[in-house]
Amino acid sequence: MPTRIDDVPAHLIVDYDVHDPALASDIHARLDEIREKYPVAWSSAHGGYWIITRYEDLHDIARNFEVFSNYPVGIPHVERPGKYIPLEIDPPDHTEWRQLLGPLFNPNRMNALEDTIREMATGLIDRFIERGSCEFISEFAHPLPSFLFLELMGWPLSDEPQISEWTDLVLTGHPGASEEENHLVRMTAAMEVVRYFVELIEARKVEPAEDFATFLLNSRFRGRPLEAEEMINTLFILMLGGLHTVRGTLGFSMVEMARRPEVRQRLIDDPSLIPGAVEEFLRFEAPVSTGRTVLKPFKFHDVEFQPGDRVLLSNPAACRDPREFPNADEVVIDREVNRHLAFSAGPHRCIGSHLARIELKVALEELLRRIPGFTIDPDRLPQLHHGQVRGFQSLHLKLR
Ligand code: HEM
Protein backbone atom coordinates (compact mmCIF):
# COMPACT_ATOMS: atom_id res chain seq x y z
CA MET A 1 0.00 0.00 0.00
CA PRO A 2 1.34 3.49 -0.82
CA THR A 3 2.69 5.59 2.02
CA ARG A 4 0.12 7.80 3.77
CA ILE A 5 0.96 10.96 5.63
CA ASP A 6 0.45 9.17 8.99
CA ASP A 7 3.26 6.75 8.08
CA VAL A 8 5.78 9.55 7.48
CA PRO A 9 8.07 10.65 10.35
CA ALA A 10 6.79 14.12 11.26
CA HIS A 11 10.20 15.79 10.86
CA LEU A 12 10.32 14.80 7.17
CA ILE A 13 7.06 16.57 6.26
CA VAL A 14 7.85 19.88 4.58
CA ASP A 15 5.85 22.75 3.22
CA TYR A 16 6.79 22.49 -0.45
CA ASP A 17 4.66 21.97 -3.52
CA VAL A 18 6.19 21.90 -6.97
CA HIS A 19 3.10 23.74 -8.28
CA ASP A 20 2.89 26.44 -5.59
CA PRO A 21 2.68 29.76 -7.50
CA ALA A 22 4.01 31.60 -4.44
CA LEU A 23 7.38 29.93 -5.01
CA ALA A 24 7.60 30.86 -8.69
CA SER A 25 9.92 33.83 -8.31
CA ASP A 26 12.37 31.98 -6.08
CA ILE A 27 12.29 28.26 -5.51
CA HIS A 28 15.88 28.01 -4.36
CA ALA A 29 15.66 29.29 -0.79
CA ARG A 30 13.09 26.59 0.03
CA LEU A 31 14.84 23.84 -1.92
CA ASP A 32 18.24 24.68 -0.39
CA GLU A 33 16.76 24.34 3.06
CA ILE A 34 15.16 20.98 2.26
CA ARG A 35 18.30 19.63 0.59
CA GLU A 36 20.55 20.59 3.49
CA LYS A 37 18.23 19.40 6.27
CA TYR A 38 16.75 16.17 4.92
CA PRO A 39 18.11 13.46 2.62
CA VAL A 40 14.48 12.85 1.66
CA ALA A 41 11.39 14.91 2.48
CA TRP A 42 7.64 14.47 2.10
CA SER A 43 5.17 16.94 0.63
CA SER A 44 1.54 16.47 1.61
CA ALA A 45 0.32 18.20 -1.58
CA HIS A 46 -1.56 16.22 -4.27
CA GLY A 47 -2.01 13.09 -2.18
CA GLY A 48 1.61 13.22 -0.97
CA TYR A 49 4.97 12.63 -2.59
CA TRP A 50 8.60 12.14 -1.64
CA ILE A 51 11.06 14.84 -2.67
CA ILE A 52 14.63 14.10 -3.74
CA THR A 53 16.98 17.08 -3.78
CA ARG A 54 20.56 15.80 -3.47
CA TYR A 55 22.70 15.31 -6.57
CA GLU A 56 23.90 11.81 -5.90
CA ASP A 57 20.47 10.52 -4.82
CA LEU A 58 18.75 11.98 -7.85
CA HIS A 59 21.39 10.57 -10.15
CA ASP A 60 20.94 7.07 -8.65
CA ILE A 61 17.13 7.11 -8.70
CA ALA A 62 16.94 8.42 -12.28
CA ARG A 63 18.97 5.39 -13.36
CA ASN A 64 17.10 2.84 -11.23
CA PHE A 65 14.20 2.05 -13.57
CA GLU A 66 13.61 -1.32 -11.94
CA VAL A 67 12.29 0.36 -8.81
CA PHE A 68 11.26 3.79 -10.12
CA SER A 69 8.83 3.82 -13.03
CA ASN A 70 8.42 6.83 -15.32
CA TYR A 71 4.68 6.32 -15.48
CA PRO A 72 3.03 8.62 -14.80
CA VAL A 73 5.50 11.45 -15.01
CA GLY A 74 3.11 14.14 -13.79
CA ILE A 75 2.55 14.95 -10.11
CA PRO A 76 -0.42 14.87 -9.79
CA HIS A 77 -1.28 12.50 -12.62
CA VAL A 78 -3.84 13.95 -15.04
CA GLU A 79 -5.85 11.14 -16.67
CA ARG A 80 -5.47 10.86 -20.44
CA PRO A 81 -5.46 8.02 -22.95
CA GLY A 82 -2.17 6.12 -23.27
CA LYS A 83 1.32 7.13 -22.17
CA TYR A 84 3.73 9.72 -23.50
CA ILE A 85 6.28 7.92 -25.67
CA PRO A 86 9.13 7.45 -24.83
CA LEU A 87 8.89 9.52 -21.63
CA GLU A 88 6.44 7.33 -19.72
CA ILE A 89 7.56 3.93 -21.00
CA ASP A 90 9.92 1.84 -18.87
CA PRO A 91 12.66 -0.43 -20.22
CA PRO A 92 12.77 -2.83 -22.00
CA ASP A 93 10.11 -1.28 -24.30
CA HIS A 94 11.64 2.13 -23.70
CA THR A 95 14.95 0.98 -25.21
CA GLU A 96 13.15 0.00 -28.43
CA TRP A 97 11.38 3.34 -28.64
CA ARG A 98 14.63 5.26 -28.15
CA GLN A 99 16.20 3.26 -30.96
CA LEU A 100 13.25 3.98 -33.18
CA LEU A 101 13.33 7.74 -32.45
CA GLY A 102 17.14 8.06 -32.33
CA PRO A 103 17.62 8.95 -36.02
CA LEU A 104 15.45 12.04 -35.64
CA PHE A 105 17.84 13.49 -33.05
CA ASN A 106 21.24 12.29 -34.18
CA PRO A 107 23.96 14.93 -33.64
CA ASN A 108 24.71 15.31 -37.39
CA ARG A 109 21.09 16.07 -38.14
CA MET A 110 21.02 18.54 -35.24
CA ASN A 111 24.27 20.28 -36.29
CA ALA A 112 22.86 20.71 -39.80
CA LEU A 113 20.05 22.81 -38.28
CA GLU A 114 22.44 25.52 -37.02
CA ASP A 115 22.00 27.87 -40.02
CA THR A 116 18.23 27.47 -39.92
CA ILE A 117 18.15 28.29 -36.21
CA ARG A 118 20.30 31.39 -36.80
CA GLU A 119 17.97 32.56 -39.54
CA MET A 120 14.94 32.03 -37.29
CA ALA A 121 16.60 33.85 -34.38
CA THR A 122 17.63 36.88 -36.45
CA GLY A 123 14.21 36.98 -38.11
CA LEU A 124 12.55 37.18 -34.70
CA ILE A 125 14.96 39.89 -33.47
CA ASP A 126 14.26 41.90 -36.67
CA ARG A 127 10.61 42.12 -35.64
CA PHE A 128 11.30 44.09 -32.43
CA ILE A 129 14.81 45.57 -32.54
CA GLU A 130 13.74 48.98 -33.93
CA ARG A 131 11.11 49.35 -31.20
CA GLY A 132 13.81 49.38 -28.51
CA SER A 133 11.87 47.02 -26.26
CA CYS A 134 10.28 43.59 -26.37
CA GLU A 135 8.32 41.06 -24.40
CA PHE A 136 11.03 38.46 -24.73
CA ILE A 137 8.92 35.36 -24.05
CA SER A 138 6.14 35.84 -26.60
CA GLU A 139 8.40 37.54 -29.15
CA PHE A 140 11.44 35.26 -29.00
CA ALA A 141 11.68 32.48 -26.41
CA HIS A 142 8.38 30.84 -27.32
CA PRO A 143 8.28 31.21 -31.13
CA LEU A 144 11.91 30.07 -31.64
CA PRO A 145 11.48 26.50 -30.32
CA SER A 146 7.99 26.35 -31.88
CA PHE A 147 9.42 27.16 -35.32
CA LEU A 148 12.14 24.63 -34.76
CA PHE A 149 9.71 21.92 -33.76
CA LEU A 150 7.74 22.52 -36.97
CA GLU A 151 10.97 22.47 -39.01
CA LEU A 152 12.07 19.24 -37.34
CA MET A 153 8.70 17.66 -38.06
CA GLY A 154 8.72 18.94 -41.65
CA TRP A 155 5.48 20.88 -41.15
CA PRO A 156 4.50 24.42 -42.29
CA LEU A 157 6.04 27.21 -40.21
CA SER A 158 2.83 29.16 -40.73
CA ASP A 159 1.21 26.87 -38.10
CA GLU A 160 3.44 28.43 -35.40
CA PRO A 161 0.87 30.80 -33.80
CA GLN A 162 -1.63 27.97 -33.45
CA ILE A 163 0.93 25.52 -32.02
CA SER A 164 2.19 28.19 -29.61
CA GLU A 165 -1.29 28.96 -28.34
CA TRP A 166 -2.14 25.30 -27.78
CA THR A 167 1.11 24.41 -26.04
CA ASP A 168 0.82 27.44 -23.78
CA LEU A 169 -2.67 26.41 -22.75
CA VAL A 170 -1.78 22.73 -22.30
CA LEU A 171 1.16 23.51 -20.04
CA THR A 172 0.04 26.50 -18.05
CA GLY A 173 -3.70 26.91 -18.61
CA HIS A 174 -4.94 30.42 -17.85
CA PRO A 175 -2.71 31.80 -15.06
CA GLY A 176 -4.86 32.96 -12.17
CA ALA A 177 -7.91 30.89 -13.17
CA SER A 178 -9.43 28.33 -10.82
CA GLU A 179 -8.11 24.74 -10.81
CA GLU A 180 -11.33 23.46 -12.42
CA GLU A 181 -11.34 26.12 -15.10
CA ASN A 182 -7.69 25.43 -15.85
CA HIS A 183 -8.30 21.71 -16.11
CA LEU A 184 -10.98 22.34 -18.71
CA VAL A 185 -8.84 24.82 -20.67
CA ARG A 186 -5.90 22.41 -20.71
CA MET A 187 -8.00 19.40 -21.74
CA THR A 188 -9.70 21.36 -24.53
CA ALA A 189 -6.37 22.55 -25.91
CA ALA A 190 -4.97 19.00 -25.69
CA MET A 191 -7.95 17.72 -27.70
CA GLU A 192 -7.27 20.34 -30.36
CA VAL A 193 -3.67 19.20 -30.61
CA VAL A 194 -4.76 15.57 -30.91
CA ARG A 195 -7.16 16.55 -33.71
CA TYR A 196 -4.34 18.38 -35.52
CA PHE A 197 -2.10 15.29 -35.27
CA VAL A 198 -4.88 12.90 -36.38
CA GLU A 199 -5.64 15.00 -39.46
CA LEU A 200 -1.96 15.19 -40.29
CA ILE A 201 -1.42 11.44 -39.97
CA GLU A 202 -4.49 10.75 -42.13
CA ALA A 203 -3.20 13.18 -44.77
CA ARG A 204 0.23 11.50 -44.83
CA LYS A 205 -1.36 8.07 -45.26
CA VAL A 206 -2.85 9.32 -48.53
CA GLU A 207 0.10 11.48 -49.56
CA PRO A 208 3.42 10.60 -47.86
CA ALA A 209 5.90 13.46 -47.38
CA GLU A 210 9.48 13.91 -46.19
CA ASP A 211 8.31 14.47 -42.65
CA PHE A 212 8.20 12.92 -39.23
CA ALA A 213 4.57 11.79 -39.41
CA THR A 214 5.45 9.77 -42.53
CA PHE A 215 8.52 8.42 -40.71
CA LEU A 216 6.26 7.16 -37.90
CA LEU A 217 3.80 5.66 -40.40
CA ASN A 218 6.67 3.70 -41.97
CA SER A 219 8.21 2.66 -38.61
CA ARG A 220 7.83 -0.71 -36.92
CA PHE A 221 7.75 -1.42 -33.19
CA ARG A 222 8.79 -5.03 -32.53
CA GLY A 223 7.87 -5.79 -36.16
CA ARG A 224 4.38 -4.26 -36.16
CA PRO A 225 3.15 -0.87 -37.43
CA LEU A 226 2.56 1.81 -34.80
CA GLU A 227 -0.95 2.37 -33.52
CA ALA A 228 -2.52 5.81 -34.07
CA GLU A 229 -2.52 6.48 -30.31
CA GLU A 230 1.22 5.66 -30.12
CA MET A 231 1.99 8.10 -32.93
CA ILE A 232 -0.05 10.84 -31.26
CA ASN A 233 1.55 10.25 -27.86
CA THR A 234 5.00 10.42 -29.44
CA LEU A 235 4.28 13.61 -31.35
CA PHE A 236 2.74 15.16 -28.26
CA ILE A 237 5.77 14.79 -26.04
CA LEU A 238 8.19 15.78 -28.80
CA MET A 239 6.20 18.97 -29.09
CA LEU A 240 5.91 19.66 -25.36
CA GLY A 241 9.42 18.44 -24.49
CA GLY A 242 11.20 21.03 -26.57
CA LEU A 243 9.14 24.17 -26.04
CA HIS A 244 8.73 25.36 -22.47
CA THR A 245 12.08 23.87 -21.48
CA VAL A 246 13.99 25.93 -24.05
CA ARG A 247 11.71 28.92 -23.48
CA GLY A 248 12.39 28.80 -19.73
CA THR A 249 16.14 28.44 -20.15
CA LEU A 250 16.27 31.34 -22.62
CA GLY A 251 14.37 33.51 -20.14
CA PHE A 252 16.57 32.52 -17.19
CA SER A 253 19.73 33.13 -19.29
CA MET A 254 18.61 36.64 -20.23
CA VAL A 255 17.76 37.47 -16.62
CA GLU A 256 21.14 36.20 -15.38
CA MET A 257 23.00 38.16 -18.05
CA ALA A 258 21.01 41.31 -17.33
CA ARG A 259 21.73 40.97 -13.60
CA ARG A 260 25.41 40.17 -14.07
CA PRO A 261 26.82 42.64 -16.60
CA GLU A 262 30.35 41.28 -16.06
CA VAL A 263 29.21 37.82 -17.20
CA ARG A 264 27.47 39.27 -20.22
CA GLN A 265 30.51 41.39 -21.14
CA ARG A 266 32.79 38.34 -21.06
CA LEU A 267 30.43 36.55 -23.45
CA ILE A 268 30.28 39.54 -25.79
CA ASP A 269 34.09 39.85 -25.78
CA ASP A 270 34.64 36.14 -26.26
CA PRO A 271 31.68 34.27 -27.81
CA SER A 272 33.65 31.00 -27.61
CA LEU A 273 32.59 31.02 -23.93
CA ILE A 274 28.91 30.76 -24.89
CA PRO A 275 28.61 26.93 -25.01
CA GLY A 276 30.04 26.71 -21.46
CA ALA A 277 27.70 29.50 -20.36
CA VAL A 278 24.72 27.58 -21.77
CA GLU A 279 25.66 24.59 -19.58
CA GLU A 280 25.97 26.85 -16.58
CA PHE A 281 22.62 28.58 -17.18
CA LEU A 282 21.05 25.11 -17.53
CA ARG A 283 22.61 24.07 -14.23
CA PHE A 284 21.82 27.29 -12.40
CA GLU A 285 18.11 27.31 -13.27
CA ALA A 286 17.28 23.76 -14.36
CA PRO A 287 13.70 24.16 -15.61
CA VAL A 288 12.41 20.56 -15.26
CA SER A 289 11.54 18.46 -12.18
CA THR A 290 10.64 14.88 -13.03
CA GLY A 291 8.18 12.44 -11.47
CA ARG A 292 8.50 8.73 -10.69
CA THR A 293 6.32 5.98 -9.19
CA VAL A 294 7.75 3.33 -6.87
CA LEU A 295 7.25 -0.23 -8.17
CA LYS A 296 8.55 -2.25 -5.22
CA PRO A 297 9.52 -1.62 -1.58
CA PHE A 298 12.79 0.25 -1.43
CA LYS A 299 14.84 1.33 1.55
CA PHE A 300 16.11 4.84 1.08
CA HIS A 301 18.14 6.52 3.81
CA ASP A 302 15.94 5.99 6.91
CA VAL A 303 12.59 5.44 5.21
CA GLU A 304 11.03 2.69 3.13
CA PHE A 305 9.32 3.73 -0.09
CA GLN A 306 6.19 1.67 -0.84
CA PRO A 307 4.79 0.52 -4.19
CA GLY A 308 2.60 3.27 -5.62
CA ASP A 309 4.47 6.09 -3.83
CA ARG A 310 5.05 9.14 -5.96
CA VAL A 311 8.54 10.68 -6.03
CA LEU A 312 9.54 14.11 -7.25
CA LEU A 313 13.11 14.37 -8.53
CA SER A 314 13.97 18.02 -8.07
CA ASN A 315 16.56 18.58 -10.79
CA PRO A 316 16.80 22.31 -9.91
CA ALA A 317 17.73 21.41 -6.31
CA ALA A 318 20.26 18.73 -7.35
CA CYS A 319 21.86 21.16 -9.80
CA ARG A 320 22.65 23.50 -6.89
CA ASP A 321 23.96 20.79 -4.55
CA PRO A 322 27.21 22.11 -3.03
CA ARG A 323 28.38 18.48 -2.58
CA GLU A 324 28.79 18.35 -6.37
CA PHE A 325 29.25 21.97 -7.42
CA PRO A 326 31.70 24.31 -5.69
CA ASN A 327 30.11 27.79 -5.41
CA ALA A 328 26.82 26.23 -6.44
CA ASP A 329 24.91 29.51 -6.00
CA GLU A 330 27.16 31.43 -8.35
CA VAL A 331 27.04 31.57 -12.13
CA VAL A 332 30.51 30.39 -13.21
CA ILE A 333 30.43 30.28 -17.01
CA ASP A 334 33.79 28.52 -17.29
CA ARG A 335 33.28 25.81 -14.67
CA GLU A 336 35.88 23.12 -15.16
CA VAL A 337 33.53 20.29 -14.29
CA ASN A 338 29.81 20.74 -14.87
CA ARG A 339 28.03 17.38 -14.77
CA HIS A 340 24.65 19.03 -14.28
CA LEU A 341 21.39 17.11 -14.27
CA ALA A 342 19.19 19.61 -16.12
CA PHE A 343 18.72 16.93 -18.80
CA SER A 344 18.46 14.22 -16.08
CA ALA A 345 20.37 10.92 -16.21
CA GLY A 346 19.70 7.27 -16.99
CA PRO A 347 17.54 5.84 -19.76
CA HIS A 348 15.23 8.88 -19.99
CA ARG A 349 18.03 11.43 -20.23
CA CYS A 350 16.73 14.10 -22.60
CA ILE A 351 16.66 12.88 -26.20
CA GLY A 352 16.57 16.52 -27.39
CA SER A 353 19.67 17.67 -25.51
CA HIS A 354 21.82 18.13 -28.67
CA LEU A 355 19.08 20.18 -30.25
CA ALA A 356 18.54 22.22 -27.08
CA ARG A 357 22.26 22.99 -26.78
CA ILE A 358 22.58 24.17 -30.38
CA GLU A 359 19.39 26.16 -30.14
CA LEU A 360 20.48 27.90 -26.93
CA LYS A 361 24.01 28.56 -28.19
CA VAL A 362 22.88 30.11 -31.48
CA ALA A 363 20.12 32.11 -29.78
CA LEU A 364 22.53 33.60 -27.21
CA GLU A 365 25.11 34.36 -29.92
CA GLU A 366 22.56 36.29 -31.94
CA LEU A 367 20.96 38.03 -28.96
CA LEU A 368 24.32 39.21 -27.61
CA ARG A 369 25.47 40.30 -31.07
CA ARG A 370 22.36 42.28 -31.91
CA ILE A 371 21.02 43.58 -28.59
CA PRO A 372 24.08 43.60 -26.29
CA GLY A 373 22.74 46.39 -24.04
CA PHE A 374 19.44 44.80 -22.95
CA THR A 375 18.11 45.40 -19.44
CA ILE A 376 15.06 44.21 -17.53
CA ASP A 377 12.26 46.80 -17.75
CA PRO A 378 12.11 48.15 -14.16
CA ASP A 379 8.42 49.06 -14.56
CA ARG A 380 7.33 45.59 -15.65
CA LEU A 381 9.09 42.94 -13.64
CA PRO A 382 9.39 39.36 -14.92
CA GLN A 383 6.39 37.12 -14.24
CA LEU A 384 7.37 33.53 -13.58
CA HIS A 385 5.42 30.30 -13.39
CA HIS A 386 6.20 27.32 -11.23
CA GLY A 387 5.55 23.63 -11.93
CA GLN A 388 7.37 20.57 -13.19
CA VAL A 389 8.53 22.80 -16.04
CA ARG A 390 9.39 26.25 -14.69
CA GLY A 391 9.71 29.43 -16.63
CA PHE A 392 8.36 32.83 -17.50
CA GLN A 393 4.92 34.13 -18.26
CA SER A 394 6.48 37.39 -19.42
CA LEU A 395 9.87 39.09 -19.46
CA HIS A 396 9.89 42.70 -20.62
CA LEU A 397 13.25 43.94 -21.83
CA LYS A 398 14.57 47.32 -22.84
CA LEU A 399 17.06 46.95 -25.63
CA ARG A 400 19.21 50.05 -25.16
C1 HEM B 1 16.54 23.35 -22.13
C2 HEM B 1 16.03 22.35 -22.81
C3 HEM B 1 15.59 21.03 -22.26
C4 HEM B 1 15.61 20.54 -20.97
C5 HEM B 1 16.10 21.25 -19.71
C6 HEM B 1 15.06 19.21 -21.01
C7 HEM B 1 14.94 18.39 -19.91
C8 HEM B 1 14.57 17.05 -19.98
C9 HEM B 1 14.60 16.14 -18.86
C10 HEM B 1 15.01 16.51 -17.44
C11 HEM B 1 14.18 14.93 -19.32
C12 HEM B 1 14.11 13.63 -18.51
C13 HEM B 1 12.74 13.36 -17.98
C14 HEM B 1 12.75 12.20 -17.02
O1 HEM B 1 13.79 11.78 -16.52
O2 HEM B 1 11.66 11.75 -16.68
C15 HEM B 1 13.88 15.08 -20.72
C16 HEM B 1 13.41 14.08 -21.53
C17 HEM B 1 12.93 14.32 -22.81
N1 HEM B 1 13.09 15.46 -23.56
FE1 HEM B 1 14.01 17.14 -22.97
N2 HEM B 1 14.71 18.93 -22.30
C18 HEM B 1 15.03 19.98 -23.10
C19 HEM B 1 14.86 20.08 -24.46
C20 HEM B 1 14.25 19.15 -25.26
C21 HEM B 1 14.03 19.25 -26.67
C22 HEM B 1 14.53 20.41 -27.55
C23 HEM B 1 13.32 18.15 -27.05
C24 HEM B 1 12.82 17.73 -28.40
C25 HEM B 1 12.39 18.43 -29.35
C26 HEM B 1 13.12 17.34 -25.87
C27 HEM B 1 12.42 16.15 -25.84
C28 HEM B 1 12.47 15.27 -24.78
C29 HEM B 1 11.89 13.93 -24.82
C30 HEM B 1 11.13 13.32 -25.97
C31 HEM B 1 12.19 13.33 -23.59
C32 HEM B 1 11.84 11.93 -23.13
C33 HEM B 1 13.04 11.04 -23.32
C34 HEM B 1 12.84 9.64 -22.81
O3 HEM B 1 11.94 9.41 -22.02
O4 HEM B 1 13.60 8.74 -23.23
N3 HEM B 1 13.70 17.96 -24.81
N4 HEM B 1 14.13 16.39 -21.10
Image (cartoon, rainbow, N blue to C red):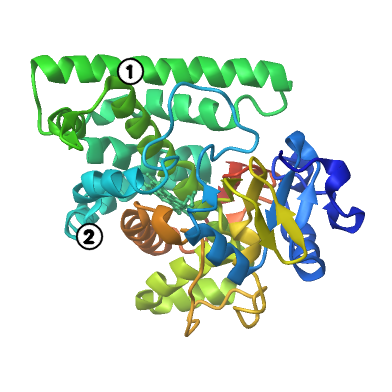
Q: Is residue 66 above or below residue 79?
A: below
Visible residue check, residue 126: no
Q: Nearer the viewer, residue 67 or 359?
A: 67
Secondary structure category for the residue under label 1: helix
Callout 1, which amino acid?
Tyr
Callout 2, which amino acid?
Pro
> Which residue in the structure is indicated by mark 1?
196
The structure residue drawn at horizontal position 59% and vertical position 63%, both measured from the top left corner, is: 58
Say which quarter of the image contains residue 300: bottom right
Say which quarter of the image contains residue 183: top right
The structure residue drawn at horizontal position 37% and vertical position 57%, both measured from the top left corner, is: 353
Visible residue check, residue 69: yes
The structure residue drawn at horizontal position 19% and vertical position 49%, both measured from the top left corner, is: 103
Q: Nearer the viewer, residue 73 or 390?
A: 73
Q: Is residue 316 above or below residue 226?
A: below
Residue 62 at what x, y percent from top left?
A: 52, 58
Res. 257 mark: none
Say which quarter of the image contains residue 179: top right
Q: Is residue 217 above or below residue 185?
A: below
The structure residue drawn at horizontal position 22% and vertical position 60%, both measured from the top left corner, is: 107
Horizontal side of 167 relative to 380 (left or right) equals left
Q: Nearer the viewer, residue 311 or 112?
A: 311
Horizontal side of 197 relative to 33 (left or right) equals left
First in sequence, mark 1 or 2: give its number.
Answer: 2
Q: Is residue 161 above or below residue 187?
A: below
Give the alpha-carbon distance from disc 1 to disc 2, as whole Å. 29 Å
Residue 283 at what x, y percent from top left?
A: 54, 66
Q: What is the crowding at mark 2: few (fewer than 14 residues within 10 Å), some, or many (at least 20)?
A: some
> Which residue in the structure is indicated by mark 2?
107
Task: Assess whether mark 2 and mark 1 are in contact (beta carbons under 8 angstroms).
Answer: no
Which image quadrant: the N terminus?
Answer: top right
